[in-house]
Image (tube, grey):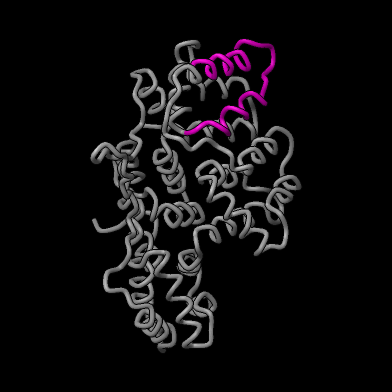
Amino acid sequence: MSFLKKFFKDVIHDRDPDDGTVTVKGKEKPKYYGTVTPYPNFSASSDASVLQAAIESKEVDKDVIVAVLVKRSNEQRQKIKVVYEASSGERLDKALKSALRSDLEDVSLALLMTPAEFDACMLRKATKGLGTNEEVLVEILATRSNREIEEIKRVFKEEYGTELEDIIKDDTSGDFTTALLAMLKANKDESTDVDIDLARRDAETLFEAGENTAGINVSAFIDILTTRSGPQLSKTFQQYACVSDVTLPKALDMELRGDIEDCLIGIVKCAWNTPAFFAEKLHLAMKGHGTCEDTLIRVLVSRSEVDLKRIMEEYRAMYDVSLQEDILRDTKGHYEAVLLGLCGPC
């Protein structure tokens, strides 16, 4: 089942996606949907010593490297990095870069970065050189919290000596630039409360700005889609179905073309069901001939301590096969072992 078919089915049946919370004594407590958890009885010095021995052995012990990296939380990996450099005199990322190759090297280095460092790195990669990977820009900016976006901007300036906003302005154009800069403002409402009246007004505004006018008022779409919370937008999408004969993604597809269409549809997908959005990305990365390793690494690493369990649930529901089965079919060796490790115990 494609994402848009799922979206259409849910909207028609007036179903909100699960918000990932559980009520405990009248309070909402977030569930943990990550697949990587802190390692019990953790010792940064012991892990640093084990990794150094594995890296310096005659035949690099990749099994040990994989076992350590995927079974430690990101916070624990940061502590290992500090101890490794203090004890060996060499940075762990540089040591691994010398010891490993290809996809295993890429995913290992990704695991050593903090979330903000990894996102900043992916954004720089997406805008560096000839061409721009617009899909990556939308994916990251549409799925990070206000606080995470502010941290990404800080790290980006620190690492690359320039403002992320300036890179976006230089590498993109038109309405697409406007939408990205709006997301970079990091002023999206993050409340879980839903205002039904606002949802109705927004749905009518979007209808008037798109289907019910000559041309399309893109700024109205950008303003609403980049500032409302996910739960609020979900209700707006349901209300939109009451004023239009088509769903909002279909309306956007009819009215827009190019980067701005992909951007706004991406925001809609993220707001409605973020795990399904990522499940679709993973599926497309392994569909047909060839595999998009960058997408596999980016999604599995960045979501392993966020919502990868839910992504795997959506993957099976949408494609009638487990994510692990497709990884086994499309990858091999120690690289495969890292990806499967990030998916958690079977």
Which of these two is toward me, 13 or 291?
A: 13
Give coordinates of residue 198: x percent, y percent: 50, 20
Give coordinates of residue 114: x percent, y percent: 50, 63
Residue depicted at x 46% and y 54%: 302
Question: Does 184 sit above or below residue 302?
Answer: above
Q: Quadrant of the C terminus?
A: bottom left
> Is 212 part of what is drawn in magenta?
yes
Residue depicted at x 42% and y 66%: 75
| Horizontal relation, residue 210 to residue 296: left or right | right
Q: Quadrant of the N terminus?
A: top left
Residue depicted at x 35% and y 72%: 68
Residue depicted at x 49% and y 85%: 86
Give coordinates of residue 157: x percent, y percent: 67, 59
Which of these two is toward me, 8 or 62?
A: 8
**Magenta: predominant secondary structure element?**
helix
| Magenta range | 200-229
Give coordinates of residue 154: x percent, y percent: 63, 57
